[in-house]
Amino acid sequence: MENETSSKNFIEQIIDEDIREGHTKKVVTRFPPEPNGYLHIGHAKSILLNYGLSREYNGQFNLRFDDTNPTKEKDEFVDSIQKDVEWLGAKWHGEVLFASDYFDKMYEAALALIKKGKAYVCDLSAEEIREYRGTLTEPGKESPYRNRSVEENLELFENMKAGKYQDGEKVLRAKIDMASPNINMRDPVIYRVAHMYHHRQKDKWCIYPMYDFAHPIEDALEGVTHSICTLEFEDHRPLYNWVVNELEFENPPKQIEFAKLYLNNVVTGKRYIKKLVEDGIVDGWDDPRLVSIAALRRRGFTPESIKNFVELVGVTKSQGVVEYPMLEFCIREDLKPKACRMMAVLDPVKLIIDNYDENQVEYVDVPNNQENPEMGSRKVPFTKELYIEREDFMEEPPKKYFRLFPGNEVRLMNAYFVTCTSFVKDENGKVTEIHATYDPATRGGNCTERKVKGTIHWVSASMGKKAEVRLYENIVDEEKGVYNEVDGSINVNPNSRTIIPECIVEPALMEAKKEEKFQFVRNGYFCVDLKDSEDGKPVFNRIVSLKSSFKLPNA
Ligand code: ATP
Ligand code: MG
């Protein structure tokens, strides 16, 4: 039996203690994306973790754009990120926040440090700063500008702000400890000169704060109590604490690190996704082969499936790698009781029932979801000529093949038993039609006298509709792994997308709405593409096939 503490993750345990000891009254968390790309599945983990904690503790969740680095930031990404966070169901408190709105306060914070003798303007070049910094085994060397007077520093920093220097000519550095075993503490740069246009602040600033200085201030100004970030920031925590302590914030936030989500053989890093987009290997940030949130949505993943996935993965401090089939497992589990099970033939071949009246149309009753009777049933037209899957017929079947072959009887799902009588081939040996006879006494696919081992799906040839279906495989060549050993590029799978322009689907699917999800019998779960579908002309993306290689550990 699990007790209360052991079922809580390590972050919840820290928060519990902070509450118990009176450090925290109201839990405030945030998600701080940099608007330089689309969000991906890893970000979803961070969003749902931070939002989840704010819900669990009846606290507050902020959405704050960390837009302190104007080079790569774009409004396009601000919009997409908001949309994705919303879609995931994470509700942020009040207005969306922007770190750049705090630039004045950050500037004042820098002045405060200078006045305390805790920051100085340094003229060393970037390369010199690097040389002076030392190594993991050797201490750094103090900058010759380290002991400038407060007055001189104030004047020079003012000049930096006034645009009197070129980019890189001067920086403001925190005065901490050049001999610290933690290199981040060796007088880190906290402000730089950069004559750049900012997407919100326009040309107001030509100095910009560095991340390690800006981030703790952003958190502190918002009253964030627990600033949750990923493991690579662990070594930056002493600097984070130094900043909030030197600036004398009353209830300083606490930084907590957790392990990033990595999926085996999947491209997650923003940088790499961007490269696939820019190189035209995929059709954009929302290409269904990617794991950006927009792409997962387009592929057909639901917010619930992503939530369940993130919960299954859990929150830890040790880095692990998760298998993609676990994500697939979560969407199957989510759709199983919800999605209508429809008939669609992806690789059609004609089946002609010779003893069926060619003018007749029968509407057979088909349950919408066998696991969920509440979803009712629908009428599907049955006619003399049907389409079935090419793989459901074999001229010379191997043992244990129970579908159609000459002389064999199978069940046409929810319709009739049919027995294959003959077939026709073209000059290339390709089967073009299959003939059969049906037994009128087996209507509904039921028969008490005899059993058949095979059941196959079908669509009326005259009443079925044509639709485009897209099948996907991993964009990564799994045999080679994600990254090319020689140049670090991505090993791309040339077969990652198969477009089937003319599948035959039952007529009801023509009314499918964008983003609606279905099970296609035997072929998997599909989603109506958000972008390329038109009214009455749906395009179906395969989300996932029906079979799983993933099993829950305790299942
Ligand atoms: P990436 O390099 O993977 O594109 P990033 O860290 O540059 O991501 P940010 O916009 O800076 O992207 O991140 C916003 C938040 O999302 C940060 O708090 C970051 O720690 C978190 N985050 C980013 N990637 C992951 C991941 N793979 N797993 C969990 N959290 C992540
Ligand atoms: Mg980043």
Image (tube, grey):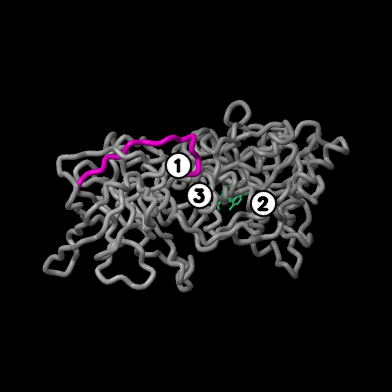
Q: Is residue 407 above or below residue 366?
A: below
- Dot 3: few (<14), some (14–19), or many (≥20) neighbours within 10 Å? many
Label 3 belongs to which residue?
332
Q: CA distance from mark 1 to mark 2?
A: 31 Å
**Magenta region, residue range:** 369-384
On the question of residue 336 being in view, the answer is: yes
**Magenta residue check for 373:** yes
Q: CA distance from mark 2 to mark 3?
A: 19 Å
Image coords of residue 50 (percent x, y): 66, 41
Name the residue at 62% across, 54% down. Answer: 260
Name the residue at 18% across, 66% down. Answer: 430
Q: Which mark is residue 105?
A: none
Mark 2 sits near ligand 1, with its Cβ under 8 Å away? no
Q: Which mark is residue 314?
A: 2
Image coords of residue 367 (percent x, y): 41, 40
Q: Nearer the viewer, mark 2 or mark 3?
A: 3
1 and 2 marks in contact (CB < 8 Å):
no
Amino acid bearing label 3:
Arg
Label 1 belongs to which residue?
369
**Magenta residue check for 29:** no
- Label 1: element kind: loop
Image coords of residue 19 (percent x, y): 83, 37
